Image (cartoon, rainbow, N blue to C red):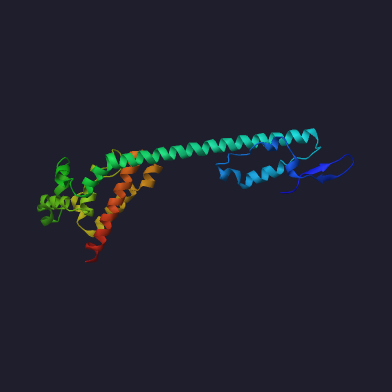
Amino acid sequence: MAQPLVRSKGETWKQQPHEQVQGILDMPLCPAHDPELCHSPSLRAETDSCAVFVGEPELRKQLREKRLREMHQRMQSQLAEKQARDAAESSEKDEKVDLRNRVVKPKIDAWQQGKKTLTSEQNKGDPKEVGTSTQGNFVGRNSWFSNFLARVQDNIRALLSTLHTVLWEGSGWNPPNMTDLVETNKVKRQYMKANLIVHPDKVKQKGGSVEQIVIADMAFDALKTAWAKFETGELRK
């Protein structure tokens, strides 16, 4: 930083040691506990522009002091906004942890471990959706197949079939028919659809609640684990 200048009558500006200048510059420019604000390039530039000159014209002094006051106000406002953001993020994080452990985790664990039976859920819907297919053997064994899937942990077909039981109302997910989960390419298609629904970033972008984001996050991870198991198993046969 250039040394402040002094101008005697009839003389040009001369440099004056900065530490000899008292007054308004003695005030702290920013909170010591927030070095990011104190060392920002914009702050350094403004501080340089507010250098004190001994014997400077009164108008210049008033303008300089005004710039300093405005700089202080901006910094205090920025600090308050930063503290508010930090507090909101901390509160949201605590709420997510509480919801995850107390509410969502037991529900997701039961779903992931296959404790949500497909038959009980499908019987609530239209029976025609459960059985109209040219896959005769598959249709005839639908009940057996449903129970089999429900008993298998981390089974991608079981998770996709019962995903609607853990999601919130209005999530946009439509449970697939059993015939949509026979062929591997159809399973992949349903998995990709599910990813679009439960991706936590997308749920957040749509204005989802904290609980919905937590559910989406855990469901997304469960589906990802089941899909990896499916890839290393059935897709490599």
Q: Residue at x 86, y 45 (%)?
A: 12
Q: In this view of the protein, which residue sits in the foreground, 42 or 234?
A: 42
Residue at the limit of the structure toward the bottom, as seen here = 237
To which quarter of the image does residue 215 belong? top left
Residue 13, percent from left and from top: 83, 44
Residue 112 visible here: yes
Which residue is nearer to you in this view: 220 or 161? 220
Outermost residue toward the right?
A: 10
At which x and y percent is residue 191? 28, 53
The quarter in which the C terminus is drawn is bottom left
Identity of the residue drawn at 67% across and 45% down = 45
| Place of residue 57 in the rendered image (x, y in percent of width and height, measured from the top left) | 81, 35
Residue 31 lies in what quarter of the image? top right
In this rendering, the answer to whether 187 lies above or below 91 is below
In this rendering, position of residue 214 left or right of residue 20: left
Q: Position of residue 96 (x, y in %)?
A: 35, 41
